[in-house]
Amino acid sequence: MNETNDESLKAQVREYWNAHPCGTQFTELEWGSKKFFDEVERFRYGTQPFMRPLMEFDNFRGKRLLEIGCGLGTDLLQFARSGALVTGVDLTPASIELVRRRFAMENLPVDARVADAENLPFADASFDAVYSFGVLHHTPNTQKAIDEVYRVLKPGGRIVIMLYHKNSIHVYLGAPLFRLSHRLRPGARTLIEDWVRVYDGAENPLGKAYSRMEIRGMFSKFSNLRTIACDPIRRKYPAAVNWLNQKLLSRRWGFWLVIKAGKH
Ligand SMILES: C[S@@+](CC[C@H](N)C(=O)[O-])C[C@H]1O[C@@H](n2cnc3c(N)ncnc32)[C@H](O)[C@@H]1O
């Protein structure tokens, strides 16, 4: 894939997420109201209570933390409430506008900007921590974005990044079933990418997933790399299925792969 194609694909990615800021799909409320933000937050951590400790919302007090692809800023707000000095970037003006409004309502400071993960507008070694949840697999050049994370991270800094996991039950079972009822989308590179893409909406132009081995290669410049697989709790499944999955399967074959590492 050449750089020109990347830019036109990225324009599609921007257009999609600008029209569907992440989280708005879970509520009917008018975007940007206090009720709306509260509802988005309640839904997110009500459904996925394990996120708070796993994403380490409380571990960065007094630290300069950058979130890449902050969407509505729901996670960024958790870091800020715990005392982190937060900066959030997203490719879409719609998200950044909502983040600014949300933080103003909370009376919390934030540097929120429209920016591209592949070309971050920050000097080298600017941040103690970089966080990104479900984002870098949506940008055409994921490796370039990871190299940018490394560049803006201070020596001694830490990352917490979630990317989709290829060796997961969601992909093993879902992709072949998807193929039975769908043709490969024109332009899709693989069946897996086409299936992963629709996880974020039928019209989402791009989604990718990686194996642990691929992740080790892509993050090879970082130190102390750990990957933790987990699965979102799915409300459409019976409680027993979710319980079994959380207890027995998701740590190995979960679809969310949380990457934690540092920089020497
Ligand atoms: C699935 S949403 C996740 C949003 C948020 N992290 C969350 O968990 O709710 C993906 C987000 O990534 C952003 N995004 C995609 N490509 C990006 C890029 N190259 N640079 C910055 N943000 C990007 C989109 O605009 C969108 O807000």
Image (cartoon, helix red, strand yellow):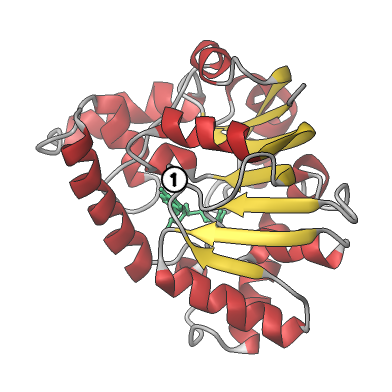
Q: Where's residue 91, x and y in %?
A: 42, 58
Residue 53 in view: yes
Task: Residue 83: name its quadrant.
Answer: bottom right
| Position above or below: 238 against 82 | above
Quarter of the figure with residue 118: top left
At horizontal 47% and vertical 37% (from top left) the residue drawn is 145
- Above or below, 144 against 103 in this view is above
Residue 26 lies left or right of residue 47; in this view the side is left
Q: Is residue 46 visible?
A: no
Coordinates of residue 155 in the picture (x, y in percent): 77, 30
Q: Tag 1, which secondary structure?
A: loop
Q: Is residue 76 left or right of residue 232?
A: right
Q: Position of residue 223 (x, y in %)?
A: 73, 18
Task: Please give the name of the residue rendered at 23% of the width and 54% of the height, measured from the top-left corner.
Answer: 12
Any atom of ligand 1 within 8 Å of the CB at mark 1?
A: no
Give the residue at mark 1. Answer: 119
Give the mark count: 1
Give the residue displayed 53% in from the left and 77% down from the top: 98
- What amino acid does circle 1 point to? Asn
List the single residue furthest toward the front: 123
**Which one is nearer the viewer's eye here, 79 or 212?**
79
Task: Judge left or right: residue 209 versus residue 36.
Answer: left
For the C terminus, the quadrant is top right
**Front in this rendered view, residue 260 or 91:** 91
116 relative to 232, above or below? below
Q: Residue at x 90, y 55 (%)?
A: 61
Name above or below for residue 216 compared with residue 41. above
